[in-house]
Amino acid sequence: AAVPLPRRQDLPRKAFCSLHEIQQRTKRFHLGVILLSYPWLHRTHPDPRGYTLSLVVQALEQGLIQNQSLAKEVEDDDDDDSNDDDKDNWEDSRKYAIFWDFASLHQHPRTEEQTASFHQGLDSLALFYSHPQTICFQVTQLPPNYPEGYLEDSSNDDGADDTLVNCAQYYERGWPFVESCWISTKDLKLAWDISKHQKALLNEEAEAETTDWATVPTNARRMAPLTPDCVAQKLERL
């Protein structure tokens, strides 16, 4: 199993991208920012076994971004005189800032200053997830061994506590549902459900290493636009 991702407060300074670094890597076709939308797999840690982390790492290592989005944008812009320069720019840039709530926003327990930063971050999420030039990774499928394989992470003196795991699917959870509404307003060439091919991404199939990542159909599902009142009503039922 992968090492669990540390929470925001426990990450070293070098794990973060400054605003200046992001601005330096901003290209004509995209911002160098990836937003992650996924279901928490445990109440005390969203990814205790590294399932989500493995999907993200493998998607990046296999060049999913370059193959599916930026290359297409360059190909669609053949008449632009700056095309060759743009292609060289994004091919040389392999560093992206990733927004991952557990690692990007301060978690409990928080100081007063961290709490203020946390709420400021929450207030900005709609802009980032719906932005026409950010990239979104969705993980809509639960792990194959869920929740059984996660109950031991909930054990106490009385045995496993299954109240610490949530069996609701991605679209039946509050934050993932709201994030999916924001993502649906984007050009879905910049939004991918990386869990659609979890077997290949996690190298569970013999042919995984030869997968043509340029043809993997990972486009996210587009939902019909909902009014704020409809979203609120849906959240009340979740």
Image (cartoon, rainbow, N blue to C red):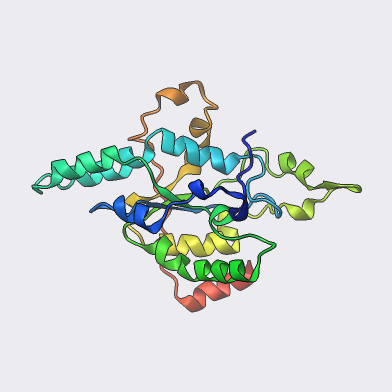
**Residue in the image at 56% along x and 62% along y:** 175
In the rendered image, the quadrant that contains the N terminus is: top right
> Toward which corner of the image does residue 8 lie, by quadrant?
bottom right
* Left or right: 157, with 211 as reference point: right
Assign the C terminus to one quadrant of the image: bottom right
Q: Position of residue 88 (x, y in %)?
A: 21, 39
* Residue depicted at x 53% and y 62%: 177
Residue 165: give x, y in percent of width and height.
72, 52
Q: Is residue 238 above or below residue 72?
A: below
Q: Residue furthest front?
A: 13
Asked if residue 236 shows in the view, the reply is yes
Residue 33, horizontal then vertical, whole percent:
39, 53
**In front: 154, or 211?**
154
Task: Please tell me whether residue 124 is drawn above or below residue 1 in the rendered image.
Answer: below
Numbered circles on residues, count: 0
Front one among 232 and 49: 49
Question: Which image quadrant for residue 9?
Answer: bottom right
Left or right: 235, with 130 as reference point: right
Q: Is residue 223 visible?
A: no
- Whether residue 210 sits left or right of residue 41 in the image: it is left
Q: From the viewer's perspective, is 168 left or right of 31?
A: right
Q: Check the image and report above or below for 175 versus 219.
A: below
Which residue appears at 55% of the width and 52% of the height?
Answer: 38
Residue furthest to the right in view is 158
